[in-house]
Image (tube, rainbow, N blue to C red):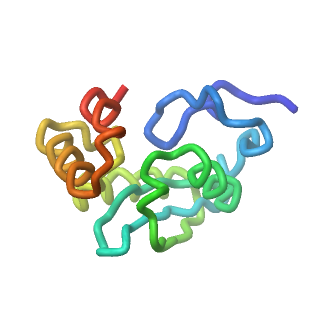
Amino acid sequence: MTINSADLLDSDGVPITDVPLKYLRPNAGREGPTDLYRWYDADGQLLYVGISGALASREAAHAKWSSWSAFAARSTTERYRRREIALRAERMAIEAEQSLFNRVHNDTPESRQRLVEYLIGKGRLDLLEPAVSRG
């Protein structure tokens, strides 16, 4: 299996270093239909916005590796004909809706403060260091 370096980045552009290869599909959806998804907690708080051309694989990876997946209760999906359109929609959604766990398009002191307050409210002090440093 050949993996391009772009395939080893999550939708925030952060390198994926310890996700098993079975969750990654080279160039999945690069030119074709792409899903934009939003994950919410049980109270309706938007946790994360992302895109994928291989949604089932991406959701499996999030369930296993994303810190916010422990809070996820429901998701919505929108399908776009082309990845470039989904990328623009993703950016607009993150900026306008201020999802808690997205970094790209949402890395401000205010967004970090909202995330810290959320994690404290959920009693997840173990996630505070990564939330504050976002690194």
Do we see residue 39 in this rendering? yes
Residue 115, position as x, y percentages in the image: 23, 47
Circle count: 0
Looking at the image, residue 87 sits to the left or right of residue 44; the answer is right
Q: Quadrant of residue 15?
A: top right
Q: Is residue 119 above or below residue 74?
A: above
Of 77 and 100, which appears nearest the observer?
Answer: 100
Residue 66, position as x, y percentages in the image: 51, 46
What residue is shown at x 59% (from left), y 65% (from top)?
81
Q: In this view, does 101 lie above or below 20?
A: below
Q: Is residue 24 above or below residue 119?
A: above
Looking at the image, residue 52 sits to the left or right of residue 46; the answer is right
Of 100 and 26, which appears nearest the observer?
Answer: 100
Looking at the image, residue 114 sits to the left or right of residue 63; the answer is left
Of 117 and 111, which appears nearest the observer?
Answer: 117
Q: Quadrant of the C terminus?
A: top left
What residue is shown at x 53% (from left), y 39% (from top)?
10
Q: In which quarter of the image is the N terminus?
A: top right
What residue is shown at x 35% (from left), y 46% (from top)?
102
Do we see residue 31 in this rendering? no
Of 43 and 107, which appears nearest the observer?
Answer: 43
What residue is shown at x 58% (from left), y 58% (from top)?
82
Residue 49, position as x, y percentages in the image: 41, 56
Residue 24, position as x, y percentages in the image: 72, 42
